[in-house]
């Protein structure tokens, strides 16, 4: 027998374990010294009352033979898919129910969707970006090209017509950068993909953080239904990181080599996936009710305000950054050419602030640093004060 040797090519992912380890060491060295955690990429607020109510009711239903549910439709119950359909309609995107597939989260589908594509394809991935795109393609042995994000393009790389890529990853609002593509920028990606016959995999995990006129969905752009799959999640939208529910949109008009990717995905899901639990789907449907939208919107606004407070402090210090507006993330330049890990250690030791070194998100992340708005207001404000004090005491410049 042979194992999948591609696993040998995976880079060990020590990012979050190293961060956790260094924070624990600092605690041991200085017990009692406060450490403000602005690094965690997980939500902290509990599920909203609308979701809790729906979950309770669904659990009750499972206790009586008349209302008990066994296997459900693999692509998700209509009561949830109809809500998602209405949600998209609110930003001008009309979807057929058959185009919406309920999942147990974005990560599963980001990996599973690759079942539909030949391993001979080339993937194009932003650098820096969420590490899952690279790892899932490496596991398949697919060739990967990177598109450079940097201060010159505000970490929003645009297509280079000379690059030959088949699978194009976009994440907007971005993790770790918090940067958001405009409609015009997404249009250039759609035009590039269509000209090449490529397929865009659009990660919309943070779309609920978008405000103003920026796009929530790739389908707000002309022609996207001929070239894009959108993968989204309730994890950051509604605090579902531990509940596990998301959705993937595969348009019916998306065809390659005479095959419908929508039908291929349906076939794949009905074979390899038996759907998300009834109880969780009831909780998810409550997210899209007017009450659920209001309650989850309050939580999102709270995280966004935390990020805005950090952004305001950095602006005042003259530090270069992206994000902090339509995102829970702030992506800041380390001071005076300092390396990501060097800045991590300085910030932790001198200010008691724990963030995430940008180098963990790709080569171009070196020299940058991620802070998040997922903490409590108190912790965020204390961290900001400690950061300001460090910059002033050390005479650090942006
Ligand atoms: C958190 C996150 C996900 C994972 O979502 P799940 O639904 O919890 O699997 C996907 N993409 C990005 C960019 C994320 O930050």
Image: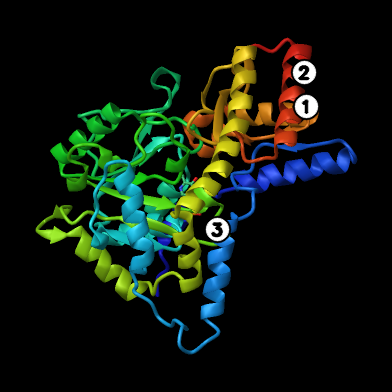
- 314 and 391: which is toward the camera: 314
Residue name at image x 90 percent, y 39 percent: 32
The first of marks 3 and 2 along the sequence is 3
Residue corresponding to mark 3:
50
Q: Is residue 186 above or below residue 248?
A: above
Disc 1 packing (10 Å; few <14; some 14–19; many ≥20): many
Disc 2 packing (10 Å; few <14; some 14–19; many ≥20): some
- 372 and 301: which is toward the camera: 301
Residue lying furthest bottom: 65
- 336 and 200: which is toward the camera: 200
- Between label 3 and label 2, give the one nearer the viewer: 3
Residue 314 percent coordinates (x, y): 62, 19
Does the Cβ of the disc 3 residue fall within 8 Å of ligand 1? Answer: no
Residue 351 image label: 1
Residue 244 percent coordinates (x, y): 51, 61
At mark 2, the secondary structure is helix
* Left or right of residue 28, residue 336 in this image: left
The first of marks 1 and 2 along the sequence is 1
Residue name at image x 52 percent, y 87 percent: 64
């Amino acid at each position: 027998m042979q194992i999948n040797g591609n696993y040998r090519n995976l880079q060990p992912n020590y990012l979050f374990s190293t961060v956790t380890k260094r924070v624990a060491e600092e605690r041991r060295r200085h017990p009692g010294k406060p450490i403000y955690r602005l690094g965690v990429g997980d939500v902290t607020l509990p599920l909203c009352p609308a979701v809790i109510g729906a979950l309770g009711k669904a659990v009750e239903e499972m206790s009586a033979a008349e209302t008990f549910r066994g296997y459900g439709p693999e692509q998700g119950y209509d009561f949830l898919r109809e809500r998602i359909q209405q949600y998209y309609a609110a930003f001008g995107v009309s979807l057929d129910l058959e185009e919406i597939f309920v999942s147990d989260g974005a990560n599963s589908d980001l990996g599973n969707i690759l079942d539909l594509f030949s391993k001979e394809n080339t993937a194009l991935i932003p650098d820096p970006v969420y590490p899952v795109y690279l790892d899932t393609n490496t596991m398949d042995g697919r060739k990967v090209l990177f598109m450079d994000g940097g201060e010159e393009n505000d970490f929003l790389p645009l297509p280079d017509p000379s690059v030959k890529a088949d699978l194009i990853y976009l994440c907007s609002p971005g993790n770790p950068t918090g940067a958001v593509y405009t409609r015009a920028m997404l249009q250039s990606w759609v035009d590039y993909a269509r000209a090449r016959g490529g397929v865009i995999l659009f990660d919309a995990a943070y779309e609920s953080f978008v405000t103003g006129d920026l796009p929530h969905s790739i389908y707000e752009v002309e022609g996207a239904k001929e070239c894009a799959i959108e993968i989204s999640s309730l994890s950051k939208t509604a605090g579902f990181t531990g509940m596990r529910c998301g959705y993937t949109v595969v348009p019916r008009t998306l065809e390659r080599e005479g095959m419908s990717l929508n039908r291929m995905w349906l076939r794949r899901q009905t074979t390899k996936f038996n759907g998300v639990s009834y109880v969780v789907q009831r909780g998810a449907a409550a997210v899209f009710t007017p009450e659920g939208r209001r309650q989850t919107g309050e939580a999102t606004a709270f995280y966004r305000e935390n990020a805005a407070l950090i952004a305001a402090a950095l602006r005042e210090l003259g530090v270069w950054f992206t994000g902090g507006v339509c995102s829970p993330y702030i992506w800041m330049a380390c001071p005076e050419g300092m390396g990501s890990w060097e800045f991590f250690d300085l910030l932790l030791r001198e200010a008691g602030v724990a963030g995430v070194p940008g180098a963990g998100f790709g080569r171009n992340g070196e020299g940058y640093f991620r802070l998040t708005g997922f903490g409590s207001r108190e912790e965020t404000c204390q961290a900001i004060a400690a950061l300001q004090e460090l910059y002033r005491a050390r005479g650090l410049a942006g």
